């Protein structure tokens, strides 16, 4: 069977893994729009969470299998049409993730910059699409909107000192910009209550270990204690609430703060007497429902980062659901011989490993539904590249780049990522 996979993140490699387990002789060509592979493991997972990035070792094992090819810097829908792949391969699996930020539509009558987390995280992780962002940390108040781990990642990265990034692969330019920070308050804003927050406990607890910052929780402790009395309270929620209560007890000399605010819906940014404020409409809980109240709160704000979820990047020939959150599909089947896995196929939630089961089910489905009648798919795609003068990176190129990045890492850092295709090509030509 000849398979094309669009994207090279976790869902792509779990798809490769399942194909090779089900049928080791499957030929798989992986197409990635960025030069480097591994999607959000390289460009999303926080640079100080190197253990999480160890999954790359497993993906690398599959990348270097003889019947797996890698074509980097090839964007399906731009460099090559989806239809071309569909004609050449027995099946195409769209594993292109959800790389766009969901927009927060609030009025902004000020100079305050609003970045989405895909942009901001992409910036500190060296994603070529976002490496030119240049956020300014020469300010006092940063607001992060969202109550999931990505909000915590953004806050932690802004809060950490250079030493706290040792053994990470944060971009050098990001570290330089962060070193000039004069930030004093990082607000993390949630619309709902602490009970509804989607933080995972290990990430939340890290907020208590920051060298310069103290976590503060702007929520009534008695209300949180009441939640702990609920009989069948989810263990994850219990741990989060306990951690937030513990934050209130921390005594430290740290002057800088990470401030958790709940029951707050951002409504607009205004400038009053030369100061920019984010206006929060305060919510309340009535009979377990979150409803808005008449109260507003103003918080001084110099930069806003939204961490409120992701959408797919459209690919010509594919229909997206009305909010562009994912490609329309039925149990992974899009149309004809085109299928989808991972964040491209459903709501963009869940950890790396959550993509494994879906990929495995999808592969079984493809094997049972698709007839294998396409021949010489790889030779045909190479011919297509050559005819259309399309240049691309192979897995051998990536092997060299990977080595160069590791060998050129600064002392105390694990990797010095090459960002753009020009710098990569320059290194490859040496
Ligand atoms: C900021 C952030 C931090 C995270 N941190 C963690 C963590 O610490 N631990 C954890 O377990 N999970 C974490 N996750 C979740 C995890 O990253 C996802 O579950 C996983 O990456 C989804 O895999 P995917 O392959 O569907 O998408 P992605 O990882 O996004 O991979 C999609 C790939 O497709 C490529 N692509 C897109 N369009 C095209 C196209 N047209 N042609 C060719 N290629 C294309 C993209 O460039 C990308 O490489 C995090 C997520 C985010 C957003």
Image (tube, grey):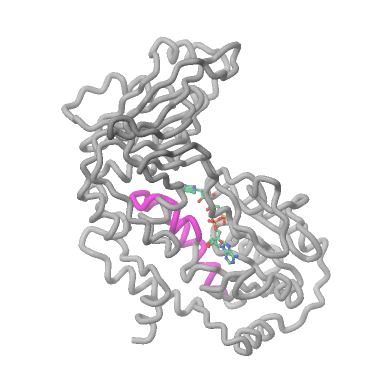
Left or right relative to 219: residue 77: right
Whether residue 55 is in magenta: the answer is yes
Magenta segment range?
39-65
Tell me if residue 96 comes above or below residue 352 in the rendering.
below
Q: Position of residue 396 (x, y in %)?
A: 47, 79
Question: Seen from this angle, which residue lies furthest front?
Answer: 273
Q: Is residue 58 magenta?
A: yes
Instruction: Indicate the quadrant containing the N terminus: top left, top right, bottom left or bottom right.
Output: bottom right
Q: Looking at the rendering, in which quadrant would you find the C terminus?
A: bottom left
Q: Nearer the viewer, residue 388 or 254?
A: 388
Residue 279 seen in this snapshot: yes
Residue 176 drawn at (x, y percent):
23, 56
Is 296 rendered above or below residue 287? below
Residue 239 visible in image: no
Magenta part mainly helix, strand or loop? helix
Q: Which sits in the foreground, 60 or 422?
A: 422
The residue positioned 55% from the left and 45% from the top of the image is: 102
Q: Residue 429, percent across and down? A: 38, 86
- Residue occupying the far left of the picture: 253
| Whether residue 283 is situated above or below residue 57 in the rendered picture | above
The image shows residue 46 at horizontal and vertical percentages of 39, 50
Residue 286 located left or right of residue 339: left
Compared across the picture, whether 127 is left or right of 174 comes to right
At a point 62% along the width and 73% down the height, the residue shown is 29
* Front residue (pair 227, 140): 140
């Amino acid at each position: 069977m000849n398979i094309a996979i669009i994207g090279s993140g976790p869902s792509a490699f779990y798809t490769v893994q399942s194909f090779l387990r089900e049928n080791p002789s499957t030929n798989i060509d992986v197409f990635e729009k960025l030069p480097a592979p591994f999607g959000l493991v390289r460009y999303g997972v926080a640079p100080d969470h190197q253990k999480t990035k160890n999954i790359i070792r497993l993906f690398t094992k599959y990348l270097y299998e003889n019947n797996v090819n890698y074509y980097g810097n090839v964007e399906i829908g731009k460099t090559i049409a989806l239809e071309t792949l569909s004609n050449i391969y027995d099946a195409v699996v769209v594993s292109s993730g959800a790389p766009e930020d969901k927009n927060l539509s609030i009025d902004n009558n000020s100079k305050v910059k609003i970045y989405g987390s895909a942009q901001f995280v992409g910036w500190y992780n060296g994603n070529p699409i976002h490496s030119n962002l240049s956020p300014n940390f020469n300010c006092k108040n940063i607001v992060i909107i969202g109550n999931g781990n990505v909000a915590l990642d953004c806050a932690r990265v802004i809060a950490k000192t250079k030493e706290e990034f040792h053994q990470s692969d944060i971009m050098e330019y990001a570290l330089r910009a962060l070193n000039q920070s004069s930030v004093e308050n990082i607000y993390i804003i949630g619309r709902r209550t602490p009970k509804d927050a989607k933080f995972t406990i290990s990430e939340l607890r890290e907020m208590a270990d920051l060298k310069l910052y103290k976590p503060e929780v702007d929520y009534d402790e008695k209300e949180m204690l009441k939640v702990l009395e609920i009989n069948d309270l989810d263990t994850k929620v219990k741990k989060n609430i306990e951690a937030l209560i513990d934050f209130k007890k921390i005594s430290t000399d740290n002057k800088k703060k990470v401030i958790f605010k709940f029951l707050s819906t951002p409504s607009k940014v205004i400038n009053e007497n030369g100061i920019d404020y984010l206006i929060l409409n305060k919510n309340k809980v009535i009979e377990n429902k979150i409803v808005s109240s008449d109260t507003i709160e103003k918080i001084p704000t110099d930069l806003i980062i939204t961490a409120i979820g992701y959408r797919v990047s459209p690919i010509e020939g594919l229909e997206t659901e009305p909010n562009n959150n994912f490609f329309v599909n039925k149990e992974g089947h899009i149309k004809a011989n085109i299928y989808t896995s991972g964040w491209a196929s459903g709501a963009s939630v869940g950890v790396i490993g959550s993509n494994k089961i879906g990929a495995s089910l999808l592969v079984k489905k493809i094997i049972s539904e698709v007839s294998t009648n396409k021949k010489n798919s790889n030779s045909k795609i190479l011919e297509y590249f050559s005819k259309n003068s399309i240049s691309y990176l192979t897995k051998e190129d990536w092997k060299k780049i990977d080595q160069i990045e590791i060998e050129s890492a600064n002392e105390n850092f694990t990797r010095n990522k090459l960002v753009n295709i020009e710098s990569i090509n320059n290194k490859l030509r040496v």
